[in-house]
Amino acid sequence: MTAKKTVPVLDMQKVDGLGVELVKACEDWGCFRILNHGIPAELMAEMKAVTASLFDLPEEIKRRTVNTEPGRGYVGRNALNPFFEGLSIEGISSTNEFCDLLDVSSHQREVICKYVKAIHDLAGNIGRKLMEGSGLDGDLFDGWSCQLRINKYHYCPESVGLIGVDLHSDPSFLTILQDDENVNGLQVVDKLSGEFTPVDHIPGTLVVNIGDIGKIWSNGRYYNVNHRVRCLEPNIRTSIALFILGPTDKKVEAPSELVDSDHPRLYAPIDVKGYRHTRYSARMRTGDALDLFKMTTP
């Protein structure tokens, strides 16, 4: 009997070889779990409680954060996604503005600010380790834009077996996800078989997904994993995700150290905001928009 495949679990406190292991997980899976990540369990629990309270706010208050750009601000339930609802903070510097718009309490503000800083710092650490594992120096995500999104899936008996969020890749470099500890449903597409692999909860860990920008930066080495969320039981599912989007002052391209005769440059330099617009306007949600930016061979 073939053993069920599971995504790798990496220890962020490992002293030697962590960078290489992270790079390999990005290349082979595009998805992995991390433990000993440095975010206290108490803070994670407090942020989940705050998340639940924000979704309990009246619709008119949540709609104060609506954004005209797809995938940003408040997203209510609709005909295309009848079970999904989301709120987002657009950049770490916008945390207090987000709190002001929703009239949060001082305790809620404190928890949100602490959590945003902690998970953003964790992303920075992952970026530095990826550089190290690639034989490079520097702070990969320094000055990059980000988004914190909280998600609620309004599951019910009628939704069991249906899709909460359709198949997609993320239009970011990477995503750090605090998934629901009670309700599973995240599934990723295995790179080799093309089959769905469940990413079930493991206490104390976080999920990391590689997105389209990660594939561009790595010159095609990283796997921009397609994934979906499926309803497995009639219970509310919540999750909290930090997206590392891209630099604000320049285009994304693979470092010269990752380009050689065996690995020619695959993609033209990409403006992150422009890429997101192209992807959404063309309704190319599964990474196929990257084909529009491939370098032409002479």
Image (tube, grey):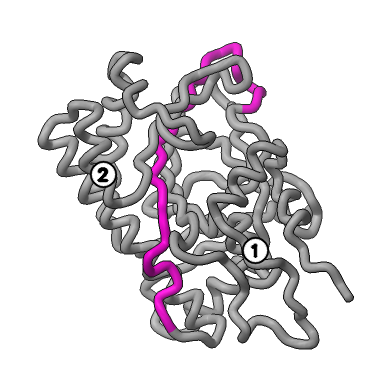
The quadrant holding residue 112 is top left
Image coordinates of residue 58 in percent, x first then y, are 30, 14
Q: Is residue 159 magenta?
A: yes
Q: Element type at marker 2?
A: helix
| Residue that label 2 marks | 95
Residue at horizontal 56%, vertical 82%?
A: 134
As drawn, 175 above or below 132: above
Q: Which mark is residue 215?
A: 1
Q: Write down the region rendered in magenta.
A: 138-163
Residue at horizontal 45%, vertical 72%?
A: 140
Amino acid, disc 1:
Lys
**Few, some or many C-alpha atoms within 10 Å of disc 1 (few <14, some 14-19, many ≥20)?**
many
Res. 42 in view:
no
**Few, some or many C-alpha atoms within 10 Å of disc 2 (few <14, some 14-19, many ≥20)?**
some
As drawn, 295 above or below 211: below
Image coordinates of residue 21 in percent, x first then y, are 55, 75
Left of 3 or right of it: where is 24? left
Q: Is residue 271 magenta?
A: no
